Amino acid sequence: MNEPNRTAGQGKNRRRSGPWPAVRFLDVLTVIRGRFAADCLLRSLGSAPRRILDLGSGSGVVADLLRERCGGEVVCSDVADRLTRDLPFVRVSESGNLPFADRQFEAVCLIDVLHHVADQKGLIDRALRVGERLFIFEVRPGRLFRWFDQAVNRLRYGGLAPAVTARDLDDWRSFLASHGYRFSVRSVGRPSPWYPFDHLVIVIDHV
């Protein structure tokens, strides 16, 4: 088992990439989305997990909001350290085993991650090994989403792979059922009327 290899404070005041006005706009949307995702997690799981792994944590803005909402420990993990918040971090490979003990976390979060992943089942299985429950928060796909996702990846993450496997509700149900997962999936709408995308939430439990 790996302990987080970043201590609190190391992500503070890290410079953001991309043109400042565009990045600032993305920051605002990320905070709105993060609060919405955290609230959806609490409603979906029924109680606040005491230890959370945010897998594919990106800038750490959403993880910081999860910590604020849930009051427990949140560990960030990604293929590269892009944190702009003071949070523990563990680097992982794109396809390797996660360096954590079995069921080390009460909840593992994949927040707007799976649409970037070709082997979605592989990542879901690795996440379920280290967490008691898996919380998935995804945008419902559409033409505007694909354009926006590419723009965010260029501005924020320097060319992160675009969405490769975006799914809507029925497609997710069919995919998860075909692999024998014990799951629930539902549409949760959007956090405000002017916010541009609808989201869906999936919770997967151990069989």
Image (spheres, rainbow, N blue to C red):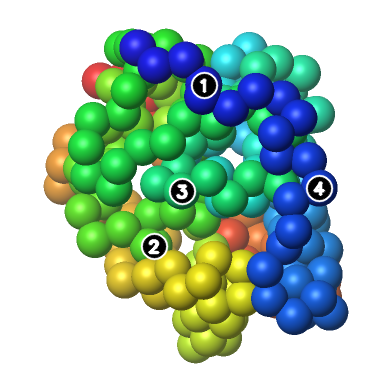
Quadrant hosting residue 66: top right
Q: What residue is disc 3 on?
A: 80
Q: Position of residue 35 (x, y in %)?
A: 77, 46
- Of residues 114 and 1, the one nearer the viewer is 1
Labels 1, 2: front one: 1
Which amino acid, by three-letter code, is at mark 3? Ala
Circle 3 — which element? loop
Name which of mark 3 and mark 4 comes first in the sequence.
Answer: 4
Residue 4, numbered label: 1
Q: What residue is disc 2 on?
A: 115
Q: CA distance from mark 4 to mark 1?
A: 20 Å
- Res 186 visible: no
Name which of mark 1 and mark 2 comes first in the sequence.
Answer: 1
Residue 61, numbered label: none
Circle 2 — which element? helix
Q: What residue is disc 4 on?
A: 13
The residue shown at (63%, 12%) is 50
Q: CA distance from mark 1 to mark 2?
A: 26 Å
Above or below residue 70? Residue 10 is below
Circle 4 — which element? loop
Name which of mark 4 and mark 1 comes first in the sequence.
Answer: 1
Above or below residue 137? Residue 118 is below
Labels 2, 4: front one: 4
The residue shown at (51%, 55%) is 112
- Of residues 28 and 124, the one nearer the viewer is 28
